[in-house]
Amino acid sequence: MSRPLCIAGGMVLVEGRMVPADVLCADGVIAGLDIAAPADAWTFNAAKLLVLPGIVDLHGDAFERQMQPRPGVNFPIDLALAETEMQLLGNGITTAYHGVTLSWEPGLRGLDAWHALSVALFARAWTCDMRLHLRWEAFNLDALDVALADIARGRVGLLAFNDHTPKMLPQLGNPAKAAAYAARSGVSVESLRTIGERAAARAAEVEGALDRLAAAARAAGIPMASHDDESVSGRDIFRARGARISEFPMSEEVAKAARAAGDFVAMGSPNVVRGGSHLGWASAAALAEARVCTLLTSDYFYPCLPRAPFVLAGRGVLGLPEAWALVSATPARAAGLSDRGEVAPGRRADLVVLAEDAGVPRLLATIVAGQIAHLTAEGAARLG
């Protein structure tokens, strides 16, 4: 049995407020606040530091850069996942849903990559709670049986409906775009175009496949999202299938309609940190301040997740407790994870300890299930 851990003297996020408290972690959960620690407990001196719930990331695809750091340059999946885990823990992310695109494209987003990543993820125990977020590409009908089987066997933690095909195929006529897609796929432009056109020819089967996937997800009790919602009517269709997360809505109108209907609205933390969408879509910061955006994800860059709540707090509309809930309590609730996302007795002891320097966070320690999973030199000096 591992030793208990007492995080002592910090300002702790409890029930929406920052309060001074000691947090005792034992047997993987938060044993209590301001209670006596056992004699054999480790003590982390958190004086003048913030103690916050661990980050829950529902959509991150930066792991793809560990699998394929350059177009056509691939590395073993176990090595990629190990490096990804270090990045996650170093950024305070204690629960991560890897957004794995299952597309008709071969290569990085194809069926072989899906199989390889699934096998590697479930082959061993990881410190970070890493799960699969299946980003189903609507026209990938050849892989439908595989997706249904993996949902049924419990390998999928979240299902998102994507439909990039109508926009991607015309771009294959652009030499630069086509070359990039082909390099990612590992085939020639001509072969990729042929594969894409063959997939597009089965358009009449798409809606039926989406219905089958949604039914499988409902039966398995896993949450669903629709990705890049383009219209209010489109969001309504996916809500009717049971998808209650609107992921990266393309306009404020769609985001507001989704929120008004009671959906979770997910946006990317890079949008907040950079001051806007790199695609010119809706501002995540403005929608968070309007209480329309309800959760933030890493999207394509993990370091933005711990930084974004401080950026929001610095804008003066949201306080840090409400801003931090966008990366902890609310995504946990959207994923149906009732055991984490808050600092409370009985919850999983997933925590981050950090300093704040002029509104900029500096992470010292990440705790997963009550054990120190990442520790800086500054953090190590506080451990005794």
Image (cartoon, helix red, strand yellow):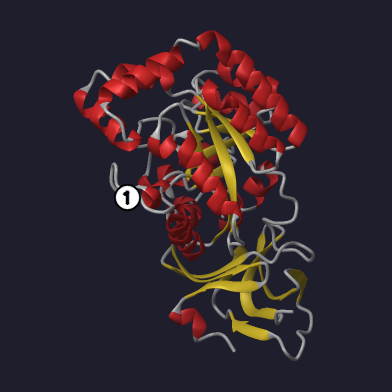
Residue 345 versus residue 60: which sits nearer the camera? 60
Query: At 47% across and 65% down in the image, what residue appears?
Result: 90
Q: Using residue 283 as the reference point, say whether residue 345 is left or right of it.
A: right
**Placement of 195 over or under 367, stated as above or below:** above
Image quarter in which the C terminus is found = bottom right
The vertical placement of 45 against 71, above or below, is: below
Tell me where residue 367 appears, x and y as whole percent: 60, 69
Residue 338, x across and y down, in percent: 75, 51
Give amino acid for label 1: Pro
Q: Quadrant of residue 58?
A: top right
Q: Nearer the viewer, residue 270 or 119?
A: 119
Residue 207 on image: x %, y %: 60, 14
Q: Is residue 170 above or below residue 226?
A: above
Q: Quadrant of residue 222?
A: top right
What secondary structure is found at the residue carrying circle 1?
Answer: loop
**Residue 300 located left or right of residue 118:** left
Q: Is residue 245 visible?
A: no
Identity of the residue drawn at 76% across and 78% down = 34
Q: Is residue 176 visible?
A: yes
Vertical placement of residue 380 versus 240, above or below: below
* 82 and 321: which is toward the camera: 82
**Residue drawn at 43 percent across, 36 percent down:** 109
Residue ID for mark 1? 69
In the rendered image, which quarter is residue 190 located in?
Answer: top left
